[in-house]
Amino acid sequence: MDQWDRFIETFFNSTVLSKYAPSILEGVWVTIELSLLIVIVGVVLGTFLALLRAYENHFLSFLIVVFADIFRAVPPLVLILIVFFGLPNAGIFLSSFLVLFLVLMLILAAFSEEIIWAGITSVDRGQWEAARSTGLGFTQALVWVALPQATRMAIPPLTNRAIAITKMTALGTVIGVPDILNQATTAQSFSGNASPLMLAAIAYVLLFLPLVVMSRWLEHRFAWRKA
Amino acid sequence: MATWRMGTSRPADDTTSRSNPELSHRVRSLVFLPAVSAVTRPAVSANGLVPSLEICGLHKSFGPLEVLKGVDLKVAHSELVFVLGPSGSGKSTMLRCCNRLEEPDFGEIFIEGDLITGRGVNLNAIRQRIGMVFQAFNLYPHLSARKNVTLALRKVRGMRWDESNAHAMEALDQVGLADKAESYPSELSGGQQQRVAIARALALEPQVMLFDEPTSALDPELVGDVLEVMRNMKAAGMTMLVVSHEMNFAREAADRVIFMDQGQIVEQGLPAEVFGFPRHERTRAFLSRVKGM
């Protein structure tokens, strides 16, 4: 058996692949489900927090900044472990799926809050003045004039961040979420072969490449020439 | 309104044409410059004629810098008042106080006799009665020309979609841009953008229109269209307060020219008077500098 055969045998073993492909496919669904939930809830929560911050209530803004800074500063894995292994001691039992969702969702919310807030602050003062001068209230100007412009500016960094964080669903492996990577490592230890990991990598590429391409399309779609 | 314009060389004071006990005081206050005025009376005059816009003793400071040092001004119905002055003279600030984009420190402002300064005034309601046009147009870049106009109609006036659209198309037609209704601001020239901005303000059917250097950001060849729209508005009887440097337009369209310097109204009169025979040294200095450009 030469080098090449050994390489194929290790990473693309057809017997192992066909045997474990169904379980990895199950993992794919778990990952998709988690990713969608994280992105939708995280971005909505982040947008809501950014809007809240626009009212410039010192106390609320302070809380939001503390939240955003902590969740952006602590490594996700640390948060996942603290919540998963810590909360049961406090009498709160959450499933590993829920813990992974909550932690990553909150991290994405923290990042999107910052990104959208940056977008809101970069909206030209004249836009606010024009809106207010036609009788729109603060909230109306915020929602109908500032937010749409902030969102457009936020889309490139936001899609990048959303992709980065949904990839972190792989961290669920350490607390037993049956996602792609978990299914693959289980299969790898049963079969003693690295092929399931390769399959996992391929699954990730198939899953996230369209997202990366879509983010590029979104950037293009939502870019407009400065007036 | 026509009476004072023809009957007196001081159209600034709409009380001059009537026998009014305050007459002598008002005329004197014009002659001696209303530096710090104590005029705070309500705008309703004896015969029921109410100025569209009345500013009484307006003061405004930004930190230690006193930008407005007691400004008094009345703008009659359908009058076009043109405000001149060097940069930093407070003319834009005065304009912005009129719809409270800037909050006055002291003084009162009335729109059609209604006090709009002070607490308890519904700002969003009052702002619909005062249209404002900005130097930088400030069109919403994410909305088409039509939607720029309909936004306030729908959100503030509570108009339904079709009603607001009809209204917007009418306003865009008035500024000659009905065919550009679906264009986005980035697809329009500066002059067209400013005309959409005027339509956005006009659609709310304001009682007073404020223009803050509406043509200063435009290429010279685009200025004419905007001025044409303003001329039409004037002809249609709109009350207008215009801060601008378009002297020729002032000469031809303004009912009255006001010269401001250092936070005060220094001089006012018919365009021919102010441009032809400026009474004050500061006015003369400013005009000669501007003509020298």
Image (spheres, coloured by chain):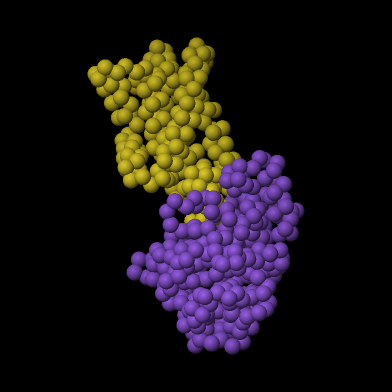
B111 w.r.t. A108: above or below: below
A80 w.r.t. B191: above or below: above
Task: Residue at 38% x, 24% y: name it.
Answer: A100
Place residue B132 in its image quadrant.
bottom right
Relative side of B20 to A171, left or right: right
Residue B36 visible within the image = yes
Relative side of B47 to A167, left or right: right
The image position of residue B193, as x and y in percent, is 64, 59
Front position in the image: B80 or B102: B80
Residue B182 visible within the image = no
Name of the residue lying farthest toward the left: A89
B132 w.r.t. B249: above or below: above
Task: Residue at 49% x, 50% y: name it.
Answer: B122
Task: Residue at 63% x, 80% y: name it.
Answer: B8
Place residue B224 in its image quadrant.
bottom right
B153 w.r.t. B231: above or below: above
Relative side of A183 to A63, left or right: right
The image position of residue B229, as x and y in percent, is 70, 64
Task: Residue at 49% x, 22% y: name it.
Answer: A33
Front position in the image: B78 or B257: B78
Relative side of B17 to A123, left or right: right
Query: Which tint is chain B?
Result: purple
The image position of residue B282, as x and y in percent, is 49, 84
Front position in the image: A191 or A176: A176
Place residue B112 in its image quadrant.
bottom right
Chain coloured yellow: A
Disc tally is 0
The image position of residue B290, as x and y in percent, is 56, 82
- For the C terminus of chain A, give its image quadrant: bottom right
